Amino acid sequence: MGMTITEKILAFHCGRDEVRPGELINVGVDLALANDITAPLAIEAFRAMGAERVFDPARVALVPDHFAPARDIAAAENCARMRAFAREQGLQHYFEMGRVGIEHVLLPEEGLVLPGDLVVGADSHTCTYGALGAFSTGMGSTDLAMAMALGEVWLRVPESVLLEYHGELKPWVCGKDLILHTIGAMGVDGARYRAMEFRGPAIDALSVQGRFTMANMAVEAGAKNGIFHVDAKTRAWLEGRARRDYRVFESDPDASYAERLLFDVGGLEPQVALPHLPSNVKPVSEVGEIPVDQVVIGSCTNGWLEDMETAARILEGRQVHPHVRCIVFPGTPRIKREMIRRGWMDILLSAGAVVSTPTCGPCLGGHMGVIAAGERAVSTTNRNFVGRMGHKEGEVYLTGPAVAAASAVTGRITHPREVMGR
């Protein structure tokens, strides 16, 4: 019997010819990463276990992106701990102010994550890198400390679920809509500790940036990882970015899947996840008249260049509604510079939006845009749990960038065609 792409990557990294779901294995790590919330805990655990040096200074990345630029003294001290550890250990991939971006956008952009890699991170959305055909998953800070010290971790081989998408996507429908639709169908535990393998003609037509968005939110269905097969688009995206050679794995035709789901997305319209679960999904036309106070465009889910382009297209020549605060968070400094070069920054500022430094900011209720009691936010982020973006009596509605930008103009949750006329 053949193996899935996930099983092949895990087998390669534990030095075996094959692995099967349910097996406990030790695997070597290509990259271990943490941020300013999780790294200080991992560093503390690293010291407590008696470790003195990381296994490889070139394969540990620390990215202060959650509360950075530091929102308060505690955040500044966490960043200081990371900075001191990075200097002590001679880490090659510590990203400080001016170079730092949102970790799950920054690391692929820097060419540090490649097809066939095994990546672990003390952040649940580490699964983002599956868009490049890598096995990547989040874990706790203690496990991450072990990975930093030894260069290996133990895992249970997950079952795989094959998700096939057919149909030509309508205008304004993107990867965010596909993954929200999927989570709505499966539920927040529908892929619990499984590998979500995304395939089909609609996936082939999707941009790599759209695939990052889908892989990012695999964890919102409970998945261990989300993963895509490497194609010409993947290779083109890696051109000029990859810092080393990489190995491509493909699922065998006779690979075994715990479940196969088929989605016809040709008739899909933009999706909205209503409070307070990413699975509480409706098409935008069925949401009704819901006024909003804040719109957030960006994050590790939709802070890519194409998301910024979508926002600029819709906001060009228009004004943000006077009752709405519109905050844009590009994923990295490079993306922000490109926005300036293409004139999108001027479009967004002229429309009345605020463009932030790359940071996680309000996504986790951190800073730079938290909401008050009774306020509603439309957001391109990945979670809308109670209190996620601020006050527990606030509400978060998850959408793609097109719905978010259109809603910023009208002051209520809106289909983009209402603003754009098509």
Image: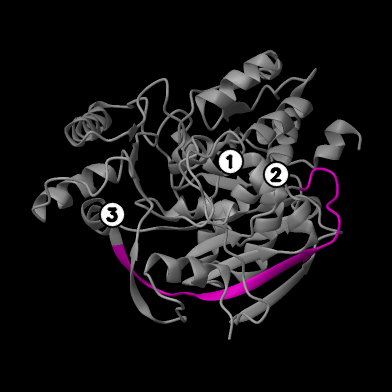
Is label 3 in a helix, a strand or a loop?
A: helix
Residue ID at (58%, 18%) = 337
Can I make out residue 21 in this image? yes
Q: How far across and how far down the image is residue 256, in percent? A: 60, 82
Residue that appears at 41% across and 31% down: 367
Check disc 3 and report the residue beneath it.
144
Q: Amino acid at mark 3?
A: Leu
Residue at 11% over, 46% down: 52
- Mark 3: give few (<14), some (14-19) or many (20+) Cα within 10 Å: many
Q: Label 1 neighbourhood size at 10 Å, few (<14), some (14-19), many (20+)?
A: many
First along the sequence among labels 2 and 1: 2
Q: Amino acid at mark 2?
A: Ile
Q: Quick check: is 158 in the magenta stretch?
A: yes
Residue situated in front as seen by the camera: 159 or 170: 159
Judged from the image, the secondary structure of the residue bearing numbered disc 2 is loop
- Closer to the eye: label 3 or 1: 3
Name the residue type under label 1: Arg
Give the alpha-carbon distance from disc 2 to disc 1, as whole Å: 9 Å
Q: What residue would you read off at disc 2?
A: 290
- The quadrant of the picture occupied by the C terminus is top right
Front: mark 2 or 3? 3
Where residue 354 sits, quadrant-wise, is: top right
Residue range corresponding to the magenta coloring = 153-173
